[in-house]
């Protein structure tokens, strides 16, 4: 049955439209019109705005579940819980672990992909294990190694071909050949957890790498004599940067510098959320490491940040409140740009006729009011 969503504004791929009515036909987006037929079924969101469902392309866990638990039911629970964050599509994200464990997790996510009933799994993000010690973060260095194409193919085969992105440190041996090969196979390569130089990052980008993992975090900083990884993401063209905008990982002014230099259309808001997202303060596990969640952060025993407990809807609100993005730019950075950066924009990230009607409703303070999946309201604030 057809229905119409009335709102003051609609955030589209290239413009903001409204007020008007968005037609939803059999769970898919229809046209945006100025008038509807008499007696039409209208859901009235006067004073509110409609935006594409958010796309979290770097998320390890939520609601006390972690992708590395290798638990299909846990992944289903994550999927359901993410609707409360405004997320309608995501890439379950792994951590550095043994080759066997990663293969098993890839297989589990591949099998559960079409069984989840909340936010849709659009693929898998392998964060590691081809990193280096200096900026290991919450990654276990015991499993670090050089990129190996045969091992990657094992994981990809186990997943059913749904690994969409893999992160590595550009200074490892064999990076250029590996990047070239997997990029040719349609997999996005991200660079991070690295002490790499500008030249090493540039070599990887020339080979096909196109994303920087959680900008500023887990990477060599900017120095006037060696621009490093931060210098690379600020200066190289046609690359995307993931960005955690919780106010703890990156200072708002640093985030603003990146947005001004790279452009809002090359910054993808992500959460890097771990299992404590949506949970009370306390003791948790990230991968194989104990983590304490307190005062809005997740930290290891060393005091280092260990992922986040950020919800993507909060990142969208934060960048607007910090005055570093307009509402349209904020929405774009949490929907279309993450999707483009991971080559999944054919499936999510925009309001487009004929696409599944996955969208969110925001109030004028950028608070989430509702989340729709396939045209059905699945979460209401």
Image (tube, grey):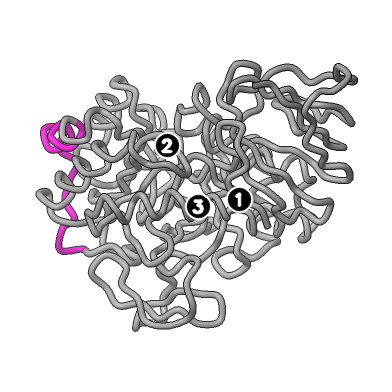
User: Disc number at residue 82?
Assistant: 3
| Sequence-earlier tag: 1 or 2 | 2
- Residue at horizontal 29 percent and vertical 47 percent from the top: 171
Q: Which residues are magenta?
A: 141-156
Q: Is residue 369 left or right of residue 303?
A: right
The label on residue 50 is none
> Residue 194: x percent and y percent?
35, 54
Query: Disc 3 to disc 1, how far (Cα)?
Result: 10 Å
Residue 202, numbered circle = 2
Instruction: Locate residue 351, reporting x and y percent.
Output: 66, 27
Asked if residue 264 is positioned above or below residue 227 in the image, the reply reads above
> Are the residues tagged 3 and 1 within 8 Å (C-beta)?
no
Mark 2 or mark 3: name the one nearer the start of the chain.
3
Specify the principal SS of the magenta part.
Answer: helix
Q: Which residue is mark 1?
A: 379
Task: Tell me whether the residue at label 1 lies in contact with that at label 2, contact meaning CB atoms closer than 8 angstroms.
Answer: no
Labelled pair 2, 3 in contact (Cβ < 8 Å)? no
Closer to the chain start, of discs 3 and 1, is 3
Quarter of the image that includes the C terminus: bottom right
Relative to 16, 53 lies left or right = left
Circle 1: element type: strand
Residue drawn at (58%, 54%) of the image: 85
Residue at 88% across, 45% down: 47
Q: Quadrant of the N terminus?
A: top right
Q: Measuring 15% from the left and 47% from the top, which residue is drawn there?
A: 104
Identify the element where label 2 is drawn: helix
User: x%, y% of residue 246?
Assistant: 60, 64
Q: Nearer the viewer, residue 306 or 30?
A: 30
Residue 359, x across and y down, in percent: 64, 37
């Amino acid at each position: 049955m057809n229905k119409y969503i009335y709102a003051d504004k609609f955030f589209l791929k290239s413009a903001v439209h409204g007020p008007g009515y968005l037609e939803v036909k059999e769970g898919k987006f229809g046209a945006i019109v100025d008038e509807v037929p008499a007696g039409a079924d209208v859901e009235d969101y006067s004073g509110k705005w409609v935006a594409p469902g958010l796309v979290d392309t770097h998320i390890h866990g939520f609601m006390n579940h972690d992708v590395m638990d290798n638990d299909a039911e846990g992944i289903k629970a994550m999927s359901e819980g993410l609707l409360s964050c405004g997320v309608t599509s995501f890439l379950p994200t792994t951590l550095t672990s043994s080759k066997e464990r990663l293969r098993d997790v890839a297989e589990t996510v591949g099998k559960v992909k079409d069984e989840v009933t909340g936010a849709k799994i659009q693929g898998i993000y392998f964060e590691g294990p081809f990193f280096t010690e200096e900026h290991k973060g919450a990654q276990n260095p015991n499993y670090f190694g050089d990129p190996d194409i045969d091992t990657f193919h094992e994981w990809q085969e186990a997943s059913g071909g749904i690994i969409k992105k893999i992160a590595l440190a550009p200074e490892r041996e064999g990076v250029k050949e590996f990047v070239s090969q997997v990029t040719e196979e349609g997999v996005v390569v991200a660079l991070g957890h690295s002490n790499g130089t500008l030249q090493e990052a540039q070599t990887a980008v020339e080979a096909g790498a196109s994303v920087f993992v959680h900008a500023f975090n887990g990477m060599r900083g900017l120095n006037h004599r060696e621009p490093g990884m931060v210098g690379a993401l600020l200066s190289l063209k046609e690359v995307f940067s993931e960005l955690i905008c919780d106010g703890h990982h990156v200072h708002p002014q640093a985030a603003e510098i990146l947005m001004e230099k790279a452009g809002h259309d090359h910054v993808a808001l992500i959460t890097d959320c771990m299992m404590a997202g949506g949970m009370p303060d306390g003791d948790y596990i990230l991968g194989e490491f104990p983590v304490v969640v307190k005062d809005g952060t997740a930290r290891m025993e060393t005091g280092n940040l260990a992922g986040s407990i950020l919800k993507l809807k909060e990142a969208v609100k934060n960048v607007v409140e910090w005055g570093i993005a307009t509402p349209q730019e904020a929405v774009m950075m949490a929907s279309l740009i993450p999707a483009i950066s991971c080559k999944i924009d054919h499936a999510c990230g925009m309001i487009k006729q004929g696409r599944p009607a996955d969208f969110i409703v925001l109030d004028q303070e950028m608070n989430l009011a509702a989340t729709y999946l396939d045209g059905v309201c699945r979460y209401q604030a």
